[in-house]
Image (cartoon, rainbow, N blue to C red):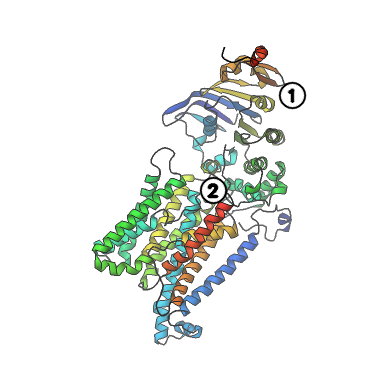
C-alpha cells in the first residue's frame, strides 16, 4: 500500500493512476484524524452546559469533584467514547456490506439488520425483562444474525439466486415486519416502552457509562475482521469468477464480512439503538474521495463515520437547547437529502 | 504437458454436460476451443480454471490434481479472463491492472517493486500505458478489453485462459485483440487457451484447435489438418466449403448458400 517511498527510481516510471496519490491519501487521512480529535474535544465541551476547555483539562489533570468535572468525567467522556465506537461500527459495517454485495445501496438498515437487532433487544427488554447491557448485547447479535440469514434465504428463493435487487427487497420487507413486531411489543408493555423510548430513535445520551466498555471488544474485533477482509474484497469487486482465479477465497471473504457486520451492527445497535444512514452515507462520500480501493475506503470510513455521528450528536445538543435532539434523528434528517442526491447523481450519469 | 484433463465428467446440478473427456493443452501454444452454443466450451474452460469441481476425473496442473493446490498457488500459474467482468465504479486503468497482482501479495508485504514492474510491463505490452490514469468507465469497448487482458497479464501466469474475449468487440477490435494475444503468446511463450465463436479467426490464430460437440471433443490438432467441410457439418450442422484464406493460407469456412443456385428465383413469389 505504501509504495516507492525513498525509491525515486521506481516512482519515476510509476504509471499515472496507479494507486494515484497514496501520499495524498495518507495526508488527508491524517487531517481527518485531527478533525476527529477536535470533534471529540468539542463533544466533551459542548452541550446544554458549555464547559471551558481549561475546565475539561482540569477534570483529568486536577480532578476536584466540582459539578463540571463530574459532568465531563461521568457523562461527556463516556458519551463521546460511545459515539466513537458506534460511529466506526455503523460506518464500517455499511462499507463492508456494500463491498461484499457489490451493491452501493447496501446498508445494515436497508438489509433489515438493524431492525433484527432492535426486535431482539426489544424482546429481551420488554418481554424477558432484561435491562443490563451485558444480557441484551447477545440478543442484538442474535437479532442481526437472524435477520441476515432470513434476508439471504428469502432473497435467494427461486431461480437466479440472491441478486442485489432481491436482497434489497427482502431486507426492506423483513425490516418492516420486524419493526412492526417491535412496535407491537412496545405497545403491550408500557413499562418497557418507557425504557425503550430513547433507545429506539438512536441516541448517545443517557446510556450507562459501562456500555462503551461492554461493546468495545466486539467493535474492535469487528473492525479487525473487516480490515483482514479488505484486500480480498478488492478482488471480489471484480466478480466471483475473477476473484477465485486471482486466488481470493470468495467464501472465506463472505464469512469474514458477515461476521464483521454482525459484530459491528449488533454492538452498535445494542449500545446506541438503531441509527440509520451513517453506514450508507459515509462509505459513499468516502468512495468519491479515495476511489474504489477497499483498504482506503475502510480506513477513511473508520475515521469519518464517528465524525458524522459525534457531529450529529453535538448538533442535536446545540440546536434546541436546553432540550436535546437525538443523534438518530439528526442523521436521518441529514441522510435523507444525501440519499436523494446520490440517487439523482447516479441517474444523471446513466448508471 | 502442464495442463490436461483426464476422464473428466462435468455438469451442473447432476445434469452432465461432458462425460469422460480427455484433453491435453500444448505448452507455449495458442489453443482455441470452438463448438456450437451450449456444447460445453465454457464449462470446460471453467473446469480448467478450477472454478468448477468435476464430478469425476480430474484436471491436472503440473502433474497434480488442480484441486489439490491452494487457490493462490493455482492463481500464480493460471489466469482467466471471464466472459464478463465487473470494473468497480471509479477505478483507474492502472489500479485495475494492479489488481491482477493479488495472488503475489501477502497481508504484510503488500506491494513490491516486482508488482510495480509487472503492472508497467503488462500495460506496455497491451498498449494501455497512455490510458493508465483514465477511469475504466470512460474507455471504449476495445480499450476496456485490452485493459482486462493487461490485468490478467499482470498476474504473470505461464497459462492464460480467455473465455470469448472478442464477443463484445467490432471486427477491427476483434482482430486487434487476437493479434495482441498471438503476439503475447509468441513473445512470452505462455500457454494460451481461448474460446472463440468465429471459425475463421480460430483457424487463423490457433496453433491447436479443439472442436467440441455436445460436451465431447470431436477433433483436435493443427487447423490446417483437421478443419474440413465434413468436420464443420458434423459439429455445427452447417453445410460449407473450405477454401484457403488468401492472407494466411489457413482454412476459411464458407457456409453454403440455400439461394446460390437459384439466384433467378429470388425475384419470384415465395409461395406459388
In the picture, measured across the screen, residue B94 lies left or right of residue B70, that is right
* Of the pair A118 and B217, the residue shown nearer to us: A118
Q: Position of residue A62 (x, y in %)?
A: 45, 86
- CB-based contact (under 8 Å), mark 2 and mark 1: no
Q: Name the chain letter of the residue that bears numbered label 2.
A: A
Residue at 37% over, 65% down: A273
Kindly identify which numbered label has been placed on residue A237.
Answer: 2
Same subunit: marks 2 and 1: no
Above or below: residue A338 compared with residue A257: below
Q: Secondary structure at mark 2?
A: loop
Q: Position of residue A34 (x, y in %)?
A: 56, 71
Q: Is residue A238 visible?
A: yes
Mark 1, residue position: B248
Residue A175: quarter of image: bottom left
In the picture, measured across the screen, residue A341 lies left or right of residue B158, that is left
Residue A193: quarter of image: bottom left
Residue B35: quarter of image: top right
* Of the pair A131 and A183, the residue shown nearer to us: A183
Q: Position of residue B73 (x, y in %)?
A: 55, 41
Q: How many marks?
A: 2
Amino acid at each position: 500500500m505504501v509504495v516507492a517511498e525513498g525509491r525515486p527510481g521506481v516512482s519515476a516510471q510509476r504509471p499515472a493512476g496507479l494507486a494515484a496519490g497514496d501520499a495524498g491519501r495518507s495526508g488527508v487521512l491524517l487531517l481527518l484524524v485531527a478533525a476527529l480529535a477536535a470533534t471529540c474535544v468539542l463533544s466533551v465541551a459542548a452541550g446544554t452546559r458549555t464547559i471551558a476547555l481549561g475546565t475539561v483539562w482540569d477534570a483529568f489533570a486536577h480532578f476536584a469533584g466540582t459539578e463540571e468535572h463530574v459532568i465531563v468525567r461521568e457523562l461527556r467522556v463516556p458519551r463521546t467514547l460511545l459515539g466513537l465506537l458506534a460511529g466506526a461500527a455503523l460506518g464500517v459495517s455499511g462499507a463492508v456490506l456494500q463491498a461484499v454485495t457489490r451493491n452501493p445501496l447496501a446498508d445494515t438498515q436497508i438489509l433489515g439488520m438493524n431492525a433484527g437487532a432492535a426486535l431482539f433487544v426489544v424482546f429481551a427488554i420488554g418481554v424477558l425483562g432484561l435491562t443490563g447491557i451485558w444480557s441484551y448485547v447477545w440478543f442484538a447479535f442474535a437479532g442481526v444474525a437472524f435477520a441476515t440469514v432470513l434476508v439471504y434465504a428469502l432473497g435467494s428463493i427461486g431461480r437466479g439466486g440472491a441478486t442485489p435487487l432481491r436482497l434489497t427487497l427482502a431486507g426492506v420487507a423483513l425490516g418492516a415486519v420486524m419493526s412492526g413486531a417491535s412496535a407491537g411489543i412496545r405497545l403491550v408493555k408500557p413499562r418497557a416502552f418507557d425504557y425503550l423510548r430513547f433507545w429506539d430513535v438512536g441516541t448517545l445520551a443517557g446510556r450507562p457509562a459501562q456500555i462503551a466498555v461492554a461493546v468495545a471488544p466486539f467493535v474492535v474485533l469487528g473492525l479487525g475482521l473487516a480490515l483482514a477482509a479488505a484486500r480480498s474484497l478488492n478482488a471480489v469487486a471484480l466478480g466471483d469468477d475473477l476473484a477465485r482465479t486471482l486466488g481470493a477465497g470468495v467464501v472465506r471473504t463472505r464469512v469474514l464480512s458477515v461476521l464483521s457486520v454482525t459484530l459491528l451492527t449488533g454492538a452498535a445497535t445494542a449500545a446506541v439503538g438503531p441509527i440509520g444512514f451513517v453506514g450508507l452515507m459515509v462509505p459513499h462520500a468516502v468512495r468519491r474521495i479515495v476511489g474504489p480501493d477497499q483498504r482506503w475506503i475502510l480506513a477513511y470510513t473508520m475515521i469519518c463515520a464517528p465524525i458524522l455521528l459525534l457531529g450529529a450528536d453535538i448538533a442535536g445538543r446545540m440546536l434546541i437547547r436546553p432540550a436535546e435532539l437525538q443523534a438518530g434523528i439528526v442523521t436521518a434528517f441529514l441522510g435523507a437529502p444525501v440519499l436523494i442526491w446520490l440517487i439523482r447523481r447516479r441517474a444523471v450519469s446513466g448508471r | 504437458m502442464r495442463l490436461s484433463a483426464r476422464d473428466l465428467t462435468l455438469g451442473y446440478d447432476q445434469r452432465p454436460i461432458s462425460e469422460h473427456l480427455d484433453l491435453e493443452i500444448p505448452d507455449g501454444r495458442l489453443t482455441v476451443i470452438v463448438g456450437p452454443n451450449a456444447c460445453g466450451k465454457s464449462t470446460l474452460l471453467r473446469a480448467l480454471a478450477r472454478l468448477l469441481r468435476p464430478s469425476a476425473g480430474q484436471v491436472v496442473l503440473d502433474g497434480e490434481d488442480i484441486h489439490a493446490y491452494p487457490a493462490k498457488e493455482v492463481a500464480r500459474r493460471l489466469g482467466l479472463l471471464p466472459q464478463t467482468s465487473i470494473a468497480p465504479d471509479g477505478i483507474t486503468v492502472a489500479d485495475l491492472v494492479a489488481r491482477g497482482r493479488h495472488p503475489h501479495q501477502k497481508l504484510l508485504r503488500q506491494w513490491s517493486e516486482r508488482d510495480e514492474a509487472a503492472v508497467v510491463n503488462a500495460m506496455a505490452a497491451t498498449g494501455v500505458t497512455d490510458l493508465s490514469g483514465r477511469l475504466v468507465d470512460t474507455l471504449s469497448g476495445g480499450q476496456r478489453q485490452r485493459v482486462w487482458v493487461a490485468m490478467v497479464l499482470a498476474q504473470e501466469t505461464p497459462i492464460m485462459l480467455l473465455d470469448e474475449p472478442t464477443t463484445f468487440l467490432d471486427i477491427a477490435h476483434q482482430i486487434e485483440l487476437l493479434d495482441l494475444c498471438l503476439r503475447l503468446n509468441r513473445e512470452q511463450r505462455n500457454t494460451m487457451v481461448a474460446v472463440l465463436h468465429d471459425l475463421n479467426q480460430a483457424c487463423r490464430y490457433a496453433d491447436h484447435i479443439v472442436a467440441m460437440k455436445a460436451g465431447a471433443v470431436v477433433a483436435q490438432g493443427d487447423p490446417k489438418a483437421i478443419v474440413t467441410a465434413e468436420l464443420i457439418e458434423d459439429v455445427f450442422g452447417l453445410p460449407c466449403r473450405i477454401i484457403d484464406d488468401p492472407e494466411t493460407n489457413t482454412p476459411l469456412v464458407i457456409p453454403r448458400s440455400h439461394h446460390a443456385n437459384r439466384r433467378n428465383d429470388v425475384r419470384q413469389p415465395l409461395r406459388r
